[in-house]
Image (spheres, grey):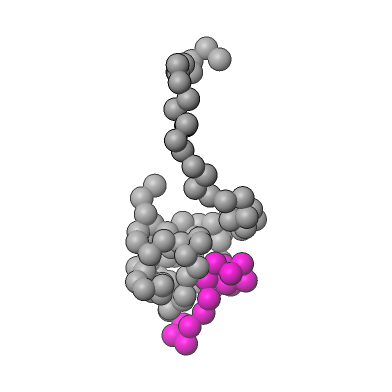
Amino acid sequence: MKYHKEHNTNPFDKSEVLIPIGIFNKISELSKTSLKVYKYIRTRAFKENGILYFDIKDAKDYCGFKENKSIYNAMSELINSDILAGRKDANEYYFNPKYIKNEKETL
């Protein structure tokens, strides 16, 4: 390839796989709507001690959705995929640390 950088040694020699194939498969099977909400959760939502505090209005604005139904469908899919689990409070969820870190992430 004409425009790629050439290396004399392997730049990935000390790298490790960060995303196991099982997790990659589950994430890649999510709908576009759920992927948008998943991205919102990882980058913007408040999380503490394994609990996600979900702000539906902020999520709707961030994801560009006009209807709450899109959020509800996405959250349902994330719950059915064992990425989230419901709590008594409708705006709180347990999150699976295999898929979501406790702190906000940057892109």
Q: Residue at x 50, y 68 (%)?
A: 96
The image quarter containing residue 83 is bottom right
Q: Residue at x 43, y 78 (%)?
A: 92
Asked if residue 98 is among those painted magenta in the image, a careful observer would answer: no
Q: Residue at x 57, y 51 (%)?
A: 20
Q: Residue at x 36, y 73 (%)?
A: 49
Q: Is residue 79 left or right of residue 3?
A: right
Return the residue found at the far bottom.
88
Check the image and report above or below for 31 versus 71: above
The image quarter containing residue 75 is bottom right
At which x and y percent is residue 84? 52, 71
Asked if residue 87 is among those painted magenta in the image, a careful observer would answer: yes
Count of numbered circles in the view: 0
Check the image and report above or below for 20 versus 55: above
Check the image and report above or below for 56 versus 43: below
> Which of the image's four quarters has the N terminus?
top right
Residue 47 visible in rendering: yes
The boundaries of the magenta stretch are: 75-90
At which x and y percent is residue 12? 47, 32
